[in-house]
Amino acid sequence: MKTLKWISVGACALAPAVALGTTLETVQSRDSVRCGVNAAQPGFSSLDDNDTYRGLDTDVCRAIAAAALGDAGKVDFVPLDSVERFTALQSGEVDVLSRTTTWTVSRDTTQGMHFTGVSYYDGQTFMVASDLGVQSAEELDGAAVCTQSGTTSELNLSDYFRINGMSYDAVVFDSPEQSIAGFEAGRCDVLSSDASQLYAQRMQLADPNMAVILPEIISKEPLGPAVRQGDDQWFNIVKWSLFAMLNAEELGVSSSNIDEHADSDNPDIARLLGQDGNFGEGMGLNADWAYQIVKQVGNYAEMFDRNVGADSNVKIARGLNALWKDGGIQYAPPIR
Amino acid sequence: MSVRPNARPAGHKPPFWRDRAKRALVFQLLLTAAVAVFLFYIVGNVQDNLSARGITTGFGFLNNTAGFGIVQSLIDYSSQDTYGRTFLVGLLNTLLVGGLGVIAATLIGFIVGIARLSPNWLLARLATAYIETFRNIPLLLQIFFWYFAVLRTLPSARDSMAFGEVIFLNVRGLYLPEPLFESGFGLIPAAFIVAIVASIALCVWNKRRQEATGKRIPAGWISLALIMGLPLLITVATGVPITWDVPELRGFNFRGGFTVIPEFLALWMALSIYTAAFIAEIVRSGIQAISHGQTEAAQALSLPRNLVLRLVVIPQALRVIIPPLTSQYLNLIKNSSLATAIGYPDLVSVFAGTTLNQTGQAIEVIAMTMAVYLTISLLVSMFMNWFNARVALVER
């Protein structure tokens, strides 16, 4: 019995730091948020000329850092490919995964993670070479389709062609750069991925006019940040960081005018900026958590326009990603 | 009754810690127990952590529907098949490129290795250039080179290079006519086997006759004619029971026939050419390890150069060549996992890539994949060790 006792003591000593501390405590003691992102996806996460990650996904990470640490700059970006991403989150390599990842039931239930919301409503479509003269996805019978390994695109593709009684050859690469190279080399007739990614990839072609994007959207792809299961506090912080940006847009608060709202009469703005009540407390944060997000990163509209919208070179219309009151479906619960 | 001599008087057995054999046994038991406890702890720890994080475990996922397409499959596969079947498809694709790679690398390697020792100046220098070039460029770059550089120079499907209107080459791959076998076809492989058996018998008889009488017939040529001729004869006699499914351009692509995808061609070429450079050096060193006196003695017997190589040098050189050759074979098979970079659907790309990601069961999938490579490597080593032992036995 004594030996058994010693073995169990040894086992406890060896046990890794799973349950030791919450994610927020880990983040605060490290003084940075580790955020899993795309290595190179223009508009969502790619390096600019100064070797800084820019994009919608990376701005979501910055908002989380602004809320949790008060400084949007305290983010360690960890570039991940589509195959590594879930393992990196599950194993604790990153605190949050913000990498154009589609929210699905299996990922939410059996893969040990929770999606916190939708930062971008996307859908899968097809890009084809213009000289093929294809107008609709229904003309693609027998085509060779380049796609990326381990994505929902790979599964949607198979469903779409089967339902429509068409055949295809799947040419599966493990990074977007290789799939676009395969498309340019003519290995496949069609490149299939989320629309946002295809618009960005089309801009990377030597001649963007050589390819057209077909009108059909064949799937729902709600993209958003995800965290590990089992830490509700961190789940809330990530979830409400995004909601704060959406609420700020709805209330007309932006990074440029936020200080004009210092003593706002509007109770919604006062609550958002922490002048009335302390909603950060329930998440272990300061009262000015949302103020820091909007001040340092901006509201949702600023983030969208800067990275993928009117002020970027991808120029994607707001579409579904407009606020609910502007005809889109972006809708955040109120802060109160 | 005689008294049995006994070194130790009874009742004075030394304590067990003074007995070397018993002591060793105790230590080994302790070590085994420690390893077992460690493994038990690791497995339990992993299970606890996975369930704490809400991650499904177990191998039940193998029966779920995969739902994704695979571009090349040696067995019937559709996206409605299970994850278990994607494992088989990936495994067979790995074995295909590994097996054909080993054959091609061996052929090229032996030719280049022997060419490097040729008295012909140009041939020897060409072989040296080949070895020094391909041995010193990282394999992944060579795979990219064969894939992207060569792929881009090929024409599109609509301007395919045609060879006699039955074989087509374009950026989508190599399209070959596929033989469709009709009834009565079974006789042809039967004839082929009969021809091989007859050839072996002929060679054995020829050797015995030569040993007995010194006379010999050109058994090699006769065997070749037999193996090629007999199946051909049967084919013609049965009225050619084969029809060819010729590829034809329809819509986007060629339909019908048999397609060799460019990913396979690129990977196969890169693996063969790269590994052949190492094999060539192994062959050269093996041949040079044979003392020059042996060659001179054989030449003094006025044996022609090809017989000197075949009967004197190579049998002895093989003993030196085979052990390092085995490691090259293992390297080639393991390197085939680089396939994932260019989208060839091998085990790592299909199973440890897509399947892992769709199911999220990293530990199970990676463990199965590692077990496969370990098994393949051990089997290859076993076969090569057996072959090595056989070669070593016939040395004189």
Image: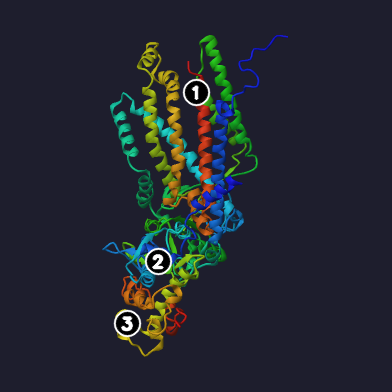
Residue type at the position of mark 3: Ile
- The reply to whether residue A166 is visible in this rendering is no
Rendered image: mark on residue A258: 3
Q: Is residue A199 above or below residue B253?
A: below
Q: Nearer the viewer, mark 3 or mark 2?
A: 3
Which residue is depicted at the point 63% across and 15% down? B6
Q: Earlier in the sequence, mark 3 or mark 2?
A: 2
Rendered image: mark on residue B391: 1
Q: Is residue A60 above or below residue B68?
A: below
- How far apart are labels 1 and 2 at the CA level? 59 Å
- Circle 2 is placed at which residue position? A198
Where is residue B236 shown, x and y percent of the image?
58, 36
Which of the 4 image quadrants contains residue B318? top left
Do residues under tags 1 and 2 come within 8 Å of each other at their CB atoms?
no
Q: Nearer the viewer, residue B229 or B108?
A: B108
Where is residue A87 shown, x and y percent of the image?
47, 57
